[in-house]
Amino acid sequence: MCKKMKQSTLILLLNGVTILALFFMVFCLACYSRITTKLNTANKYRYELTYNANRFMNGSSYLTNEVRAYAATGSQEHYDNYWNEVNHLKNRDIGVEKMKEIGITAKEQSMIDEMSNLSNTLVPLEENAMKNVMAGNEAAAVDYVYGKEYESSVAKINQIKSDFLATLDDRTLNEVNRLTGVSYIIFCCFVAVVFMIVVLQIITFRLLKSRLLKPVVEIKDQMYEIASGNLSHPFNLEPDTSEIGMLVNSIHSTRTELKKYIEDIANKLSLIAEGDMNQTIDIQYLGEFLPIQKSLIRILDSLNDSLQKIHRTANEVSLGSDNVAASSSIVSQGASEQAAAVEELSANAEEISSHLDRIVNKAESAKSCSTEAARQLMIGTRQMEELSEAMGVISGSSNQISGIIKTIEDIAFQTNILALNAAVEAARAGAAGKGFAVVADEVRNLAAKSSEAAQNTTVLIENTLKLVEKGVTLTGNTMATLKQVGKGAMESTDMVDEIAAASARQQEILSQFTESIHQISEVIQSNMNTAETTSTASDELREHARSLESAINQFKLRQ
């Protein structure tokens, strides 16, 4: 078995290098961020230093320009601007303070001090110039601020300004360039680390694919073949000292052991199939295969014992089959006599069953007729009840009509009286009341006719009420009679139901009896068939016993 680095060690090594590279990449990012911050700060300071240096210089130039303008023109505005810058704006002082806060070198501070001293030497000249302007001596004032001494000092200040700005710009530019270079170097390191991580990941993937994934896939396929029962499938992986190699070695060992067990079992079963039962299990089965070895031993022992018992039993069966054949003939003859008696009994039972079927059918018809009659009587009873209720309603309505007619008679009587009164009044009126008298006569005639009609209607209603009362009495009597008839019909229906139920029960019992006779007949017939079959089977059994004995003699059994 060849030696190889373990997959776990290789993966741990590659991952360790990758993690270190990641840490270095994070460190580069942090450094790059810090340098970028410093670079931005340096650019900011460069701008602010330049701005404040120009502020200092511009403040000094502003004072020079304002005092010269005042000396030349005598304008109060230039005078006020000069003292406003000196006392309030103070751009020179503020510019110097800001530059000191940011940070300047000793050389730059020396140059600022020198410019301040030179500027201070100009102050007496500027004050004298302003005093001469106030005194009206403008020519003397111009000589002070445009004279050789003033011009020489201004020229020196301007030269120092140029040198100061150049020195300041060179220093800040060098710092910015230095930080830019460091930033570029860190960025290159970061790119290199990222490239190294990518390369490491590619190497890791290729190693995992070649030394882990590919062998695992082949192992998976081989295990699938083994699980499918194919132990001869090609397996080209070689064992080694790595984890995968040890697994491959285990698979090779498993295939070898399984083949050995299968070949041994196939060999033993082949000899058993050929009739050689005098076998022993020579190979020692290991682990979970040990029960197979024990089962094979038990199978061989059991087959030997069973075949020896079968051999002895075959002899006994051959002797007993002759006795069974003789007994079967006796049983067959007795069964034939029983079958004839049962057939006669079955015919009698079927005739009785036919009579009962007719009785049950007639009872069912009587039950249907009785039930229908009872239903019709119930309908007639309900209709008589409804008729009785209608008679009552008619009687009530007639009474109401009598009241209405009484009211009509009262109205006719009152109308007649009013007509008489009207006729009397018309007579009193004379010729003017003749038309009214005619109307009163017509009204009295109508009232008389209404009264007569009401009296005739009353007579008719009274006759109707008498007839209605008589109808109610007859309806009640008829309804009572129908109820009695209905009760009798129900009792008759119940009696028919009992007769039908009793007949059905008798028919059911007779059917069970007939079924039992048929079953007995079938049992007897079955016994006859069985006896015949038994006789035939005993002959066949005798032949089979002899064949079995001959077959058992072919086996090579243990002694």
Image (cartoon, grey):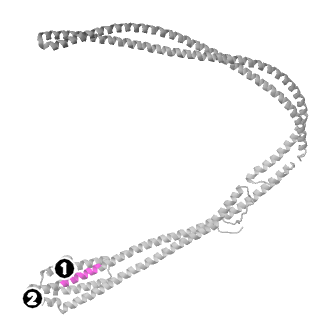
The span picked out in magenta is: 51-65
Rendered view: 79 above or below 276: below
Residue 374 % position (x, y): 55, 15
Residue 137 in the figure: left or right of residue 102: left
Residue 109 in the figure: left or right of residue 491: left
Depth-wise, is mark 1 or mark 2 nearer the camera?
2
Question: Could you tell me if residue 538 is visible in this image?
Answer: yes
Q: Residue at x 83, y 52 (%)?
A: 270
Which residue lies under the disc numbered 2? 137
Q: CA distance from mark 1 to mark 2?
A: 24 Å
Q: Residue at x 16, y 85 (%)?
A: 69
User: Is tag 1's residue or tag 2's residue first in the polypeptide sequence?
Assistant: 1
Q: State the residue in front, 338 or 134.
A: 338
Q: Residue at x 15, y 9 (%)?
A: 424
Which residue lies under the disc numbered 1? 86
Residue 433 % position (x, y): 14, 13
Question: Could you tell me if residue 497 is visible in this image?
Answer: no
Binning the other alpha carbons within 10 Å of mark 2 as few (below 14), some (14 to 19) or many (20 upward) gives some
